[in-house]
Image (cartoon, rainbow, N blue to C red):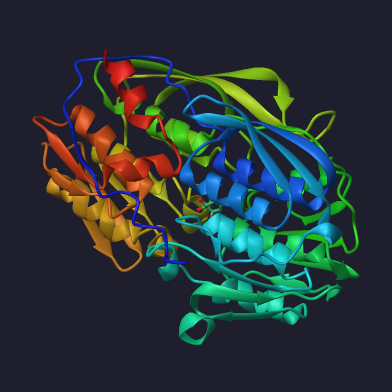
């Protein structure tokens, strides 16, 4: 099977907005949507996943779940979000897929599926598009091998396609991740479900904890060790746990919301409200960084929290309203980068409009995303007149700088496409984005929401 074609070949022009007003619809949280589908596949019975993001990444996971033998039905869709009904024979009933599992552009599908497949006694091959084939996999091969699965990747086990020959049971491990990564942590915990004995993952910086919350709400014991702040943390799961089939309501995606938070903060005549956004402490860093920069963001908690039906460990939600702001520069440390890993490109745009020099230290992991996001962000914003300096893994940005419309390249990376589109709203003249269409990897109606906001 050929890799899926590159997503974002189409170009689009963005013109400055006189004002921004309204309530853009947001996609369901991408991280939670993937996990809800995968955990539904592991639980015997029927689960409803309501409000999943309908971007291409989550669609890839849905197709993989179906290829493993669960029945996946789309029971409602609105061009942005989708409700799924998943009926699964449960972990022991999943079957060897007949073909290659196509993760398309989605690193989360690749890493999380590898963790599950490591504990299933058959052969699978995970592949994806040209971008996915450049994403590192040694970080999951190493721990999953040490649990007893056989995994092989291209270029001396460093790149996809990834071959997984699973084994059941696996052996539990105690593992410290080398890079802060929720995908690696989740892959190991999901493999730990199929292990004999406990599996512990330790991380120097706490990453998003959706897998842990969602396992708990499905009846699996997951113990947390060490600090409750942003410092070192460990998670332990007992092997052999069975998941309860559990419905999930997916909250609105805070990483998608970040584009509108920055748009509202940097535009001189803006007021934008975002409803029921997930504000899990491990996901809200971009909101807090923008508040530190002086952004006018009002936050109103929404009750009840959402997540798995009947669970006590749902995801906290809030309505967020952002208005035009006077931003000031801040310093981001490596821990801030890990916590706001998907929001750094749009925060760089915010920094171009902030008074002073914003510094971002230790951003190297951004080179391992859908594109080299350090180079891609710097090139695009520089073309628009921004003053950005990259020194190794560190970025510094001087502001405020008026932006001018220019030709930018999204490098088939959804977050770059949306960053340059928001920049185009405040730039003079027209901004073209080569590869604009890649936004629909995570946010299918992004440009339609943008048009509504400026109307
Ligand atoms: C994700 C974790 C992050 C993030 C990605 C989604 C997840 O990746 O960049 O968009 O759902 O676990 P890493 O954990 O590899 O940094």
Residue 156 image position (x, y, % from top left)? 50, 87
Q: Position of residue 413 (x, y in %)?
A: 35, 51
Picture residue at 51% right of the left edge, 31% below the top: 27
Q: Is residue 387 visible?
A: no
126 lies above or below 65 = below
Is residue 18 at all visible to an observer of this figure? yes
Q: How many marks?
A: 0
Where is 200 relative to 258, above or below?
below
Residue at 42% over, 66% down: 2
The relative height of residue 163 versus residue 453 in the rendered view (above or below) is below
User: Residue 295's quadrant in the figure?
Assistant: top left
**Ligand 1 shown in quarter:** bottom right
Is residue 51 left or right of 408 when viewed as pictured?
right
- Closer to us: 400 or 442: 442
In this picture, residue 434 sits left or right of residue 25:
left
94 vs 37, nearest the viewer: 94
Percent of width and height locating residue 249: 69, 30
**Screen quadrant of the C terminus:** top left
Q: Residue furthest left?
A: 429
Q: In this image, 291 relative to 62: left or right? A: left
Residue 392 x, y percent position in the rendering: 31, 69
Residue furthest to the bottom in view is: 156
Instruction: Give left or right: position of 119 versus 435.
Output: right
Q: Residue furthest front?
A: 98
Residue for point 83% across, 32% down: 312
14, 262: nearer the viewer: 14
């Amino acid at each position: 099977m050929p890799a899926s074609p590159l997503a974002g070949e189409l170009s689009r022009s963005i013109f400055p907005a006189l004002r921004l007003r309204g309530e853009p619809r947001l996609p369901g949280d991408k991280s939670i949507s993937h996990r809800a589908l995968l955990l539904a596949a592991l639980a015997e019975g029927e689960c409803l996943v309501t409000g999943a993001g309908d971007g291409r990444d989550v669609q890839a996971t849905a197709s993989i779940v179906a290829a493993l033998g669960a029945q996946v039905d789309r029971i409602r869709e609105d061009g942005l979000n989708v409700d799924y009904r998943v009926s699964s024979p449960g972990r022991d009933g999943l079957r060897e897929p007949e073909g290659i599992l196509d993760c398309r552009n989605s690193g989360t599908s690749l890493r999380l599926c590898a963790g599950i497949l490591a504990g299933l006694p058959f052969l699978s091959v995970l592949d994806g598009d040209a971008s996915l084939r450049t994403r590192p996999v040694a970080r999951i091969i190493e721990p999953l091998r040490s649990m007893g699965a056989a995994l092989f990747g291209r270029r001396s086990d460093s790149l996809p396609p990834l071959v997984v020959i699973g084994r059941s049971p696996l052996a539990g491990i105690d593992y410290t991740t080398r890079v802060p990564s929720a995908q690696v942590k989740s892959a190991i915990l999901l493999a730990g479900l199929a292990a004999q004995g406990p599996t512990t993952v330790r991380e120097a910086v706490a990453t998003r904890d959706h897998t842990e919350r969602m396992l708990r709400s499905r009846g699996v014991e997951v113990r947390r060790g060490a600090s409750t702040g942003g410092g070192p943390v460990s998670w332990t799961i007992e092997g052999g746990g069975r998941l309860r089939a559990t419905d999930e309501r997916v909250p609105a995606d805070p990483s998608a919301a970040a584009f509108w938070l920055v748009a509202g903060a940097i535009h001189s005549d803006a007021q934008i409200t975002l409803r029921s956004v997930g504000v899990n402490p491990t996901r809200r860093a971009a909101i807090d960084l923008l508040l530190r920069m002086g952004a006018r963001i009002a936050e109103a908690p929404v009750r009840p929290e959402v997540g798995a039906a009947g669970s006590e460990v749902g995801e906290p939600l809030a309505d967020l309203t952002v208005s035009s702001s006077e931003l000031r520069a801040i310093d981001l440390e490596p821990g801030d980068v890990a916590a706001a890993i998907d929001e750094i490109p749009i925060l760089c745009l915010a920094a171009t409009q902030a008074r002073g020099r914003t510094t971002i230290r230790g951003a190297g992991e951004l080179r391992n995303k859908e594109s080299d996001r350090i180079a891609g962000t710097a090139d695009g914003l520089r073309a628009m007149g921004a003053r950005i300096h990259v020194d190794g893994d560190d970025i510094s940005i001087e502001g405020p700088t008026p932006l001018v419309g220019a030709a930018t390249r999204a490098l088939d990376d959804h977050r770059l496409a949306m960053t340059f589109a928001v920049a185009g709203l405040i730039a003079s003249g027209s901004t073209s984005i080569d590869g604009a269409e890649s936004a629909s990897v995570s946010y299918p109606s992004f440009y339609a929401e943008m048009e509504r906001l400026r109307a």
